[in-house]
Each structure stands twice: as C-alpha cells, then as structure tokens.
Amino acid sequence: MKIRLYGDPILRKKAKKVEDFEYLQSIKDDMLKTMYIEDGVGLAAPQVGISLRFFVMDDGNGPLFVVNPEILEHSTEKEIGEEGCLSLPGIFADVERYKWVKLKFQDEYGKVQTKLFEGYSARIVQHERDHLDGILFIDHLPTTVKRRLSPELSKIMRMRLEETK
C-alpha cells in the first residue's frame, strides 16, 4: 500500500460508510503493515487511497481496527500536543484536541463497541477520524503557522506530482 501525500484529492473527500466487512478482512493486515513500516501510530483508509470510514491505530497497547467511528461524547477540557501525519512527511505542529473522547465504532468483523480514549490515544482517534471527513491536522492550525509551513507543504505537493508522473 502506498501512502497518499498532501495534495491528493482523496485526502479531502468525506469517506463512505463501511458495509462490506469481508473486504476489510482482505486488507486489514496490509493496513497495519503499512502503518508499522512507515513508523506511524495511526493510518486512515483515505491515506492509502480507500475512501471508506475506517482506520488502524496502535497507541502502544497493540493494534486496533476502528470502523465507522462516531464520537459520542468528549471532554470540555482540551490539551495541546505535537502531531505529524504520514501524508505530510516532515511536518509537525502543536494541535489542540479534546483530552478524552467516547467513541462508538465497529471492529473489523462488524461488532459494535463503545470505548473511552484518553490522552495520547484520544489524540490518535481524533486525528484519524478527521481523515475520514477530509480534514488534515494542519486545518486546525492558526493561519500564521500555516503560512510558516507553506514552503514545506508546497514541497510535499511537488513530491506527490513527481510520483504521479
């Protein structure tokens, strides 16, 4: 699987709900393998060119497959932490996120689950869920920071165009 880079239109599309869980069985290992090879802690389907609502993550407690996620509740408190993204290589910035989120989702077999994610895990969930709505972490940054990152973002877009030639 190949990571799609910033500028790829699929990264800005709202992904469709997963209904074919057999399909997920055929790609789940590749998704996890790609995430680990790229040294990521999360990987959303649109990042590998699949416009479906699922992602894989590993916050250090083992891999988790999250399908059709919905945030049911979240903290009122937020915290700032550094984020990066496999689709934006070399770009890191502080992003404000909820301290905890209560998530309803399905596993890779379609079984519905509800789980509370806190701290680092909550940050991963929010980042990856954003991908499913076509939102990148840089969209949460102040305009001044985005302006400062502009040369690096342009460089990534040029890399993407070179790859597609």
Image (cartoon, rainbow, N blue to C red):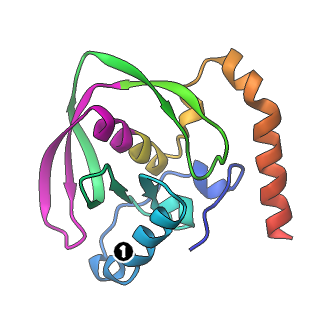
Q: Give the quadrant of residue 149.
A: top right
Q: Give the quadrant of residue 47.
A: bottom right
Residue drawn at (36%, 81%), measured in percent from left and top? 23
Residue drawn at (67%, 43%), measured in percent from left and top? 90
Q: Quadrant of the N terminus?
A: bottom right
Q: Quadrant of the C terminus?
A: bottom right
Residue 95 to residue 88: above or below: above
Residue drawn at (55%, 40%), measured in percent from left and top? 84
Residue drawn at (40%, 68%), measured in percent from left and top? 32
Give residue 139's position: percent from left, percent from top: 58, 31
Q: Disc 1 designates what residue?
A: 28
Determine crowd level at label 1: few under 14, some 14-19, many 20+ residues with C-alpha closer than 10 A.
some
Give residue 2's position: percent from left, percent from top: 61, 70
Left or right of 78 in this view: 45 = right
Residue type at numbered disc 1:
Lys
Give residue 58's position: percent from left, percent from top: 33, 55
Helix or strand or loop: what does disc 1 sit on? helix
Residue 119 to residue 41: above or below: above
Q: Nearer the viewer, residue 109 or 51?
A: 109
Looking at the rendering, the stretch of residues picked out in magenta corresponds to 98-126
Q: Is residue 109 magenta?
A: yes
Q: Nearer the viewer, residue 106 or 34?
A: 34
Q: Nearer the viewer, residue 103 or 33?
A: 33
Give residue 74's position: percent from left, percent from top: 23, 28
Residue 61 to residue 93: above or below: below
Q: Give the quadrant of residue 110.
A: bottom left
Left or right of 47 in this view: 157 = right
How many discs appear?
A: 1
Q: Is residue 114 magenta?
A: yes
